[in-house]
Amino acid sequence: MLIHEFDRNIDEKGRLNFPSKLRGELGAQFIVCMGLDKYNKCLFAYSLEEWDVLKQKIQRLPFSKAAAQREIYASAMIAQPDAQGRIVISEKLRKYAELSKDIRIIGVSNHAEIWDSAARERSSQQFDMASFIDALDAERDN
């Protein structure tokens, strides 16, 4: 399970030292793509197994969603950390997620998310614990 939060820097070439704890869960190679979050711009990192699960869901979408499928697949990249644990984030993905130098990487159960630190801070401030607990309570009642 992918958990915890890590602060990192990304250099001008797009190199990012990916946390070893998350690399261990994601595997020797993993997929980085546009984040599937309709309210925030970040990147998602999936193990190859989790990517296959997502790919199956995407392929079941109606043909009317073909443009979205193209964007997800076209922007996705295979990340293979080098000996120092660095991956290179493509320019297209860096622009999409509006990544600056300061990065925050978080584990979110079955995937990791790569955020611009300032954007992650804003998102975190919007979190409403009471609403989350209400949703959990409603799930338990079902």
Image (cartoon, grey):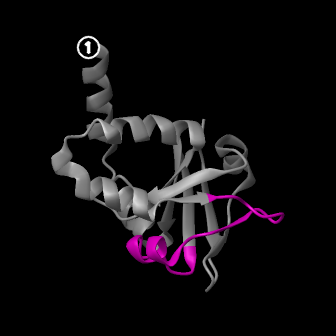
Q: Which element is circle 1 on?
A: helix
- Is 22 colored magenta in this rendering? no
Amino acid identity at mark 1: Asp
Circle 1 Cα neighbour tier, 10 Å, few/some/many (<14 / 14–19 / ≥20) = few
Q: Indicate the position of residue 80 as horizontal and vertical percent values.
A: 69, 58
The stretch in magenta equals 79-102
Query: Taking 15 as reference, is 122 left or right?
Result: left
Residue farthest to the right, as pictured:
83
Task: Please state, as top left, top right, bottom left or bottom right, where the C terminus lies in the image.
Answer: top left
Is residue 85 at all visible to an observer of this figure? yes
Observer-nearest residue: 14 or 10?
14
Task: Please state, as top left, top right, bottom left or bottom right, where the N terminus lies in the image.
Answer: top right
Observer-nearest residue: 38 or 104?
38
Residue located at (27% from left, 30% from top): 135
Q: Indicate the position of residue 65 as horizontal and vertical percent values.
A: 21, 50
Question: How many numbered marks, from 0 up?
Answer: 1
Residue located at (37% from left, 66% from top): 122
Q: Quadrant of residue 13?
A: bottom right
Residue farthest to the left, as pictured:
64
Query: Taking 15 as reference, is 62 left or right?
Result: left
Q: Is residue 108 above or below residue 72?
A: above
- Is 101 colored magenta in this rendering? yes
Q: Quadrant of residue 78?
A: bottom right
Q: Indicate the position of residue 134 as horizontal and vertical percent values.
A: 26, 30
Observer-nearest residue: 76 or 106?
76
Residue farthest to the top, as pictured:
142
Query: Taking 140 as reference, is 118 left or right?
Result: right
Is residue 38 at all visible to an observer of this figure? no
Query: Taking 11 as reference, is 50 left or right?
Result: left
Residue located at (64% from left, 82% from top): 11
Residue under numbered circle 1: 141
Q: Is residue 97 above or below residue 66?
A: below
